[in-house]
Amino acid sequence: MSALSFTSEVEGIEWPALPAPGNAALLAVLFQMEQSQWWPPEELRRHQDRQLASLLDHARRTVPFYRDRLAHVGSLDGDALSEAWSRVPRLRRSEIQAAGSDLISTALPRGHGEVYETFTSGSTGRPIRSTRSDAWFMLWRAVTLRDHIWQRRDLRGKLAGIRESDRKVATYPQGVAHGAWSDIEAMVAGHGPAVGLNIHCSVEQQVEWLVRQDPDYLLTFPSNAAYLAEYCLSRGVRLPKLREVITISERLDPDVRATCREAWNVGIGDIYSAREAGYLALQCSDYEHYHVQSEVTLVEILDEAGRPVAPGGVGQVVVTPLHNFAMPLIRYEIGDLAELGGPCGCGRGLPVLRRILGRTQQMLVLPSGERRIPLLSSGSLKTLIAAAPIRQYQLCQKSLEHIELRLVTARRLEAGEEERLRGWVREKFGYPFVVSFSYHDEIPRNPAGKYQDFVSELGGASAPGP
């Protein structure tokens, strides 16, 4: 990574830069994290417990959902916290849905700023609303910078992102252009530009656009990266300036790394995050496994009995974001499985996840043969939730012309509600599918123990996965 030179907000002072107050606070957080990543695990956990005690006290006092839920746990301060932690119930998505506004704090502490909403279904098909604060976003931005530093990215380069799922945004052939990667990278003097394209564009359109843009970095989903790399390999298309593929949102199969290296001679920097919980783990700077971001999230890997697994063991991922006081998610079962690793050779004390299992995405196939990632944006999910009292959903492609919408609802839907949902499906996927409905008490998990919000009964429609 080239040396970072930050933008100064004081006229006449170019170096060392005097950043704006908000950026100065961000850099102060990053400075602390640059130290804490090297702490031994016991020291990291001691500081996590301090923050957990503050979060739990706030939740018990100001979040209606937790007043009774945490009442029987006992003391959550100091040394007693570690003993009481296993008695804190795990949080399931169905409980988040049922709790509604009872999960929102009635008195956000001073300094946490404004709050913002997002909607997600993850890989569960259970749409939920999540609320975060400015303070939470400050920590999120710090981890973003950490990821750039770890992966030695040159922020003066050009970033091409193919992930936008709102069909009206970043459309082919132009896409959309930005002055910087985001407001985070805009702090850097001489920062590079960013361009974006809609994920619903065909692979041919995406490759043509990428050749025109000639980026230094590509940000997209693992399954999409695989299709792009395979397409380029089969047609001898090169991206001569490309330095790295950055992948998000889905499980990264090792074969995708190999395909990207063969097609473009670049590696992959993968990020493990969740819309409702934020950053969970980043790929190590020296190895292909992941480091839990302990400064912002407590991540537990638990076996079927709820006990922590030993290194080499696979278990359920349970997360507690440490700084979301607007809507605390305490011991939240995120729906993924992961394999715990041992100490990392890089020397960091941050816990290691050797593999992340789950979040595999199947592909929608149009009658033309074009394949698309059926990603649902926060806005799409907000529209879905507003259309009908849906507790869980699953879209199933039965044929090239037919999609079945499987639903768990508070009641049987009326004809008008079903018709609105038909319109939602057709608009989302850009094709006049026949849309049928089936109603269920529960939508079961797949054989790997995962919920999937989209499944296909067409052969060969799966993106890379376990």
Image (cartoon, rainbow, N blue to C red):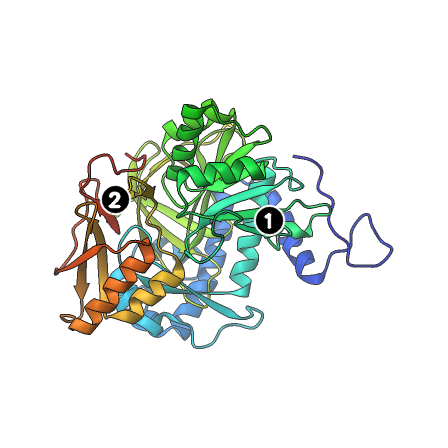
Q: CA distance from mark 2 to mark 1?
A: 36 Å
In-front residue for pair 447/465: 465
Tell me the residue that label 1 is attached to.
181
User: At label 2, which amino acid type do we have?
Assistant: Pro
Q: Is residue 298 left or right of residue 429?
A: right
Q: Position of residue 282 (x, y in %)?
A: 48, 41
Picture disc at residue 340: none
Q: Quadrant of residue 315?
A: top left
In-front residue for pair 423/247: 423
Residue 129 appears in the figure:
yes
Q: Position of residue 377 (x, y in %)?
A: 39, 57
Tell me the residue that label 2 is attached to.
367
- Disc 1 packing (10 Å; few <14; some 14–19; many ≥20): many
- Label 2 SS: loop
Q: Position of residue 466 (x, y in %)?
A: 28, 34
* Label 2 close to label 1 by CB (< 8 Å): no
First-in-chain label (2 vs 1): 1
In the image, farthest residue toward the right: 12
Residue 270 appears in the figure:
no
Q: Quadrant of residue 128?
A: bottom left
In-front residue for pair 96/120: 120
In the image, farthest residue toward the front: 368
In-front residue for pair 74/399: 399
Which residue shows up at 16% across the image and 51% down it?
Answer: 444
Q: Is residue 178 left or right of residue 43?
A: right
In the image, farthest residue toward the bottom: 106
Quarter of the figure with the N terminus: top right
Q: Position of residue 420 (x, y in %)?
A: 25, 68
